[in-house]
Amino acid sequence: MTENEISKVIVDSAIEVHRTLGGPGLLECVYEEAVVDELERRGMKVERQLSVPIIYKGKQLGMPLRLDLKVNGLVLIDNKAVAEWNPIFEAQMLTYLRLTKLKLGLVINFGEQYVKNGIHRVVNGL
């Protein structure tokens, strides 16, 4: 599957989770657990809470980044459950994509009344 095909499955899964659990109102970790379950039901391979080392001038820094989810080895997901959107979320995702050399990430805010309005696509040279 391509990044775009995977992202469609992710969006459909997020909408299903939000429709089933309701929202806003739950913690980010609850939505994450449900998204993982829904993606796996749809045949996706999901890696959770990935640790990504940060290299500065050839030296690995002590604090790695924690990424929420990676789907089929190609698309990152950063889950949020916040009332107010902050543009820094997209900037962070772009940084994650650059560090992992991946091309597509989705920031999904389950804190929106309609989760579709809270899905932000971030690309790194796709």
Image (cartoon, helix red, strand yellow):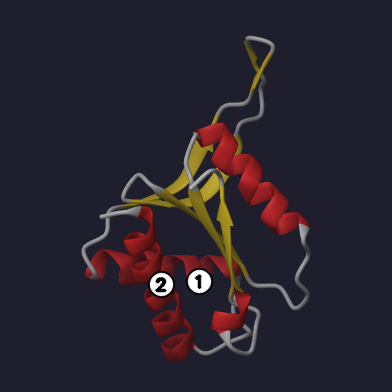
Nearest the eye: 94 or 13: 94
Q: Residue at x 38, y 77 (%)?
A: 12
How many dots with numbers? 2
Whether residue 56 sits left or right of residue 86 in the image: it is left
Residue 72 is situated, as x and y percent measured from the top left of the image, at 31, 50
| 25, 10: nearer the viewer | 10
Q: Residue at x 51, y 35 (%)?
A: 100
Label 2: which secondary element: helix
Which is nearer the eye, 94 or 126? 126
Which amino acid, mark 1? Answer: Val
Q: Which amino acid, by three-letter code, is at mark 2?
A: Ala
The answer to which quarter of the image holds residue 79 is: bottom right
> Going 61% across and 81% down the picture, which residue do you hit?
117
Identify the residue position indicated by label 2 in the image: 34
From the image, tell me which residue sits under label 1: 30
* Spatial separation of the CA atoms under disc 1 and disc 2: 6 Å
- 78 left or right, relative to 83: left
Crowding at label 1, few (<14), some or many (≥20) Cα neighbours within 10 Å?
Answer: few
Compared with 65, 61 (above or below) is: above
The residue shown at (67%, 20%) is 61
Quick one: SS at disc 1? helix
Residue 60 drawn above or below residue 10: above
